[in-house]
Image (tube, grey):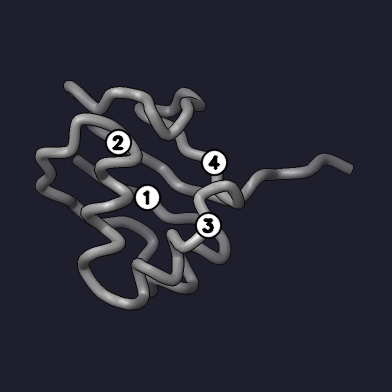
Amino acid sequence: MQVLYFAWVRERIGLPREEVESSAATVMDLVEELRAREPRYAAAFADVTALRVAVDQSLVDFDAPLSGAREVAFFPPMTGG
């Protein structure tokens, strides 16, 4: 699946996107897999309460299933103004 990183998440990881092979059942399982990769991922996902996630361009919670997902995007909450 394609995993996309935006704003400071992208800055901490150093990539805007990557293809990830994963057996994760939920978004949180994917986060745990990514955290275990390297310290830069652990830093980016240290506090998931500061993040939002979208699966196939629909906002979801971190307990959302990933079965059949083609794209997962992580980004900080956005504010209007």
Residue 36 horizontal side relative to residue 5, left or right: left
Which residue carries the number 3 mark?
47
Q: Quadrant of the N terminus?
A: top left
Task: Tell me where residue 77 sits by quadrant.
Answer: top right
Mark whose residue sits in front, 2 or 3:
3
- Tell me the residue that label 4 is attached to: 52
Q: Is residue 21 left or right of residue 63?
A: left
Q: Residues within 10 Å of mark 1 (few under 14, many from 20)?
A: some
Q: Earlier in the sequence, mark 1 or mark 2?
A: 1
Left or right, 61 with respect to 28, comes to right
Cα separation between marks 3 and 1: 17 Å
Of tags 4 and 1, which is closer to the observer? 4
Q: CA distance from mark 1 to mark 2?
A: 8 Å
Labels 1 and 2 touching (C-beta < 8 A):
yes
The label on residue 4 is 1
Disc 3 is placed on an element classified as: loop
Q: In which quadrant of the rendered image does the C terminus lie?
A: top right
- 52 relative to 69, above or below: below
Dot 2: few (<14), some (14–19), or many (≥20) neighbours within 10 Å?
Answer: some
**Residue 12 location (% of width, % of height):** 46, 73
Frontmost of labels 2 and 4 is 4
Q: How many marks?
A: 4
Tag 4 and tag 3, C-beta contact below 8 Å: no
Q: Mark 4 vs mark 3: which is more N-terminal?
A: 3
Residue kind at label 3, given as amino acid type: Asp
Residue at disc 4, secondary structure: strand
- Horizontal and vertical percent position of residue 23: 10, 39
User: Which residue is labeled 2 in the image?
Assistant: 71
Q: Nearer the viewer, mark 4 or mark 3?
A: 3
Do residues under tags 2 and 4 come within 8 Å of each other at their CB atoms? Answer: no
The residue at 37%/50% (across/down) is 4
- The percent position of residue 51, horizontal first and vertical second, equals 55, 48
